[in-house]
Image (cartoon, rainbow, N blue to C red):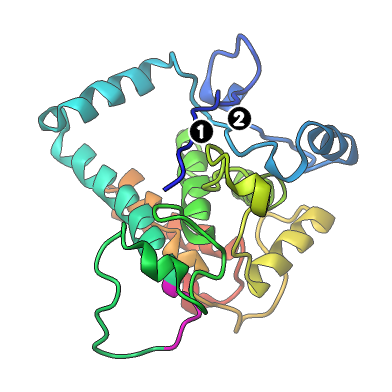
Amino acid sequence: MPKTRKRKRRVGPEGSKTLKDRVMTFPDGVGKKLRAKMERSGGWESLCTYSILRDDDPDLKELRLKMESPSKLSRQESRAMGCLLGNVLGDALGSPLEFSDVRYGSTELKEMGQESVWEKVGYNRFALKPGQWTDDAAMALCLADSLLVHQSAHFDSYDLRLRFVNWWDFGYNNAFGYDDDRPKRFGRRSVGLGGNIGASLDEFKQKRTPYTTSGDKETSGNGSVMRNGGVPARFWSDLETGMAVAWKQSKTTHQGDEAAE
């Protein structure tokens, strides 16, 4: 596999004190001036390496120490980590098979490093490398970021919807920020936008509604379910709030009750 080099992560304003100060939250949505500025600074990839945490953030330092010695993780932390990492790894493992024919009992994909599957004709529609994720994990990371930043309010639908826009328009939380080979072939633009979610992003840019009004009550799909892992990780001790937030986050992109339930 081609090597990648480490690229400095882009973070929020210098001197900010809190997570909320450092994250890209704009009450009026993505304005024309902001969009023009971001497009000049990198266009579709301008947020590929953006993080809500600084490299010297105490929370990040503590997490890194615990990851070096997993036994230091509490039971809840270990489960939350497994939930989110499992979400991303499962998405990455299954990505080359997306859109391929269903063949029950097939065992051709056995491990992440099995590059022959990623290179097989008709597979790997997004031309990913083993370990790179799609829209499902990227949107799960957007949801996790939003829940971290807005802990006191539990959930901010405007913030989450804006993060989804930033994912698709500017590469926020996609898998390509540290891949130096991809720009030569495809660029670092995000991949995997489906019809229902695409319509919800277009609607949000125009109307700035807290929950999507695109589609109808029959518009469900599974996109909002696949990104939901951060909700139980955040609200593991408060089932009622967790259920409410799971419902609300689904409604940011899908009107249908079936997906929310």
- The magenta stretch is 97-101
Q: Main secondary structure of the magenta part?
A: loop
Q: Residue furthest top?
A: 15
Q: Position of residue 133 (x, y in %)?
A: 46, 55
Q: Earlier in the sequence, mark 1 or mark 2?
A: 2
Would residue 123 be found to the left or right of residue 233 on screen? Answer: right
| Residue at horizontal 67 percent and vertical 80 percent from the top | 216
Q: Quadrant of residue 205?
A: bottom right
Q: Circle 1 — which element?
A: helix
- The answer to whether residue 98 is magenta is yes
The C terminus lies in quadrant: bottom left
Q: Hey, what amino acid is under mark 2?
A: Val
Q: Which residue is mark 1?
A: 149
Would residue 145 be found to the left or right of residue 194 on screen? Answer: left
| Residue at horizontal 29 percent and vertical 48 percent from the top | 238
Q: Position of residue 239 (x, y in %)?
A: 30, 55
